Amino acid sequence: MRKTPGSRRKLTILSLAAATYFMVSGGPYGMEDLVRDAGYKLSIVILFVTPLIWSLPTGLMVGELAAALPAEGGFYVWVRRAMGPFWGFQEAWLSLVASVFDMALYPTLFATYLGILWPAATAGRRGFMIELAVVLACVLWNLFGAKAVGNGSVLLGALMLSPFVLITAAAFFRHIKLGPTPHSGEASLFTGILVAMWNYMGWDNASTVANEVENPQRTYPRVMLLTLAAIFASYVIPLLAVWHLHVQPEVWSTGSWASIATMVVGPWLATALVAAAMISEFGSFNSLVMSYSRLPVAMAEDGHLPKIFKRKLAGGAPWVAILVLGIGWAASLGLSFDKLIMLDILLYGASLVLEFLALIFLRIREPQLPRPFRVPGGMLGAIAVGIGPTALLVIALIQNRHEHLDLWKIGNVSQLSFGLALMGLGVVYYFVAGRAPMAVNEKEASKMI
């Protein structure tokens, strides 16, 4: 079948899978502390079990809803259609507020890794300017449209993973012995699960660009499974290779991939791994700009935001939303937050629970809605698929409810209290300024999707 000019600007399975990979994972970075805290055996178990309970159900849910409602705004549209404008607004609010904290980390880590390779480049205020440059580069890249971001993600993904391919090959086939593998520390199951959840988080972000995806009804279910397999393999295979070398778990810490690369191959590969880490942070930020920038467009369509957010370039890029969010993320670069995992999981987890509820509500309210892909098991399957992720969220929050963060000059603040306050602020904002001036007729809205 000959492609139309419009289809040439749309994301294919490969480009969407690559962008989703960066939205969720960004590569094997981030699992170092898991190995140190839990040891190799328990780490492998956690990395295997967590996606079965956390990622696979989420991927199935996203696959059904994205195929049934392939609309701009993705998860916001699902929740709004299933549960009404108030809950749809809260879904978008939780995601955008979480992005203020989450998105600031990627440019900061990019500059940190650059400082390892070239200390003079980030000395003094130069580091902050590098962070701003990352934000600007990704904003400009996104102005070329989703297709440009997706195709770029394919290239960035290949470059980022290539050093890990070399480490894996060297570790499996050179049979280097780097000492015994005693792990005397107590394995931390709950900490390990929390880290694994962090590294497998963000599947629904791919849904916001559904109207820019080629044949979304067939593409999304395949992308979810393909990306899950790719992320699992990129975590577990290099880890098994290093375990094969008998590297002690105590050697692992944040950023230790570079030192392990030096031990296994040489300093040059450590340099390549640090460069790959920069690519990972850049690619994740770039893909998430694409995802988050579609939310204000959908919210403006429903009257929650000014109409100016609906403006797009010829290639489909929502330039106003991209620029406004880019300015917001740039402004958040100066904030200093510590131990953000629990806060991110709280905000993201609340939005994820709303999405699982939307799956159930739509099954009940719109049983005749065309669903090219369905979560197996009928209504029981739709209910059961949300139990595992919700249970993990509850366990994670209970186990880490006493975590604190250093919030500006206020001092230590409970992450749970701060997160709940942000959630409450979304409710207040909706009734003060977020409601549409005139209620949207739900039947007409359904026809638009």
Image (tube, rainbow, N blue to C red):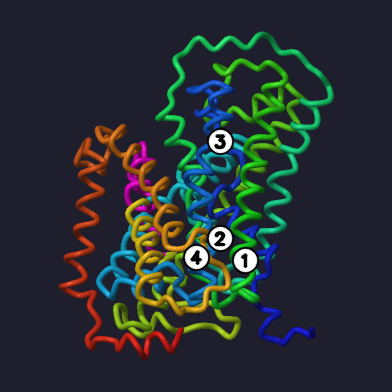
The three-letter code of the residue at mark 4 reads Ser
| Quadrant in the picture for the N terminus | bottom right
Contact (Cβ within 8 Å) of mark 3 with mark 4? no
Q: Which residue in the protein does label 2 denote?
A: 287
Residue 131 at x, y = what percent?
49, 51
Q: Earlier in the sequence, mark 1 or mark 4?
A: 1
Type of the residue with mark 2? Ser
x and y percent of residue 243 in the render? Answer: 67, 22
Question: Marks 2 and 1, how far apart in space?
Answer: 7 Å
Numbered badge on residue 217: none
Label 1, on which residue?
Answer: 149
Q: Quick one: SS at disc 1? A: helix
**Residues tagged 4 and 2 counted as in contact (Cβ below 8 A):** yes
The image quadrant that residue 255 belongs to is top right
Residue at the (29%, 78%) spot, across then down: 304
- Percent coordinates x, y for residue 89 in the rendering: 30, 70
Q: Which residues are magenta?
A: 327-348
337 magenta-colored:
yes
Q: Which residue appears at 64% of the width and 76% of the height? A: 215
**Do residues under tags 2 and 1 come within 8 Å of each other at their CB atoms?**
yes
- Amino acid beneath label 1: Val
Q: Where 349 falls versus 193 (above or below)?
A: below
In the displayed structure, 262 sits above or below 11; it is above
Q: CA distance from mark 1 to mark 3?
A: 28 Å
Residue type indicated by callout 3: Leu
Closer-to-camera residue (267/8): 8
| Residue identified by numbered label 4 | 291
The label on residue 47 is: 3
Q: Is residue 151 magenta?
A: no
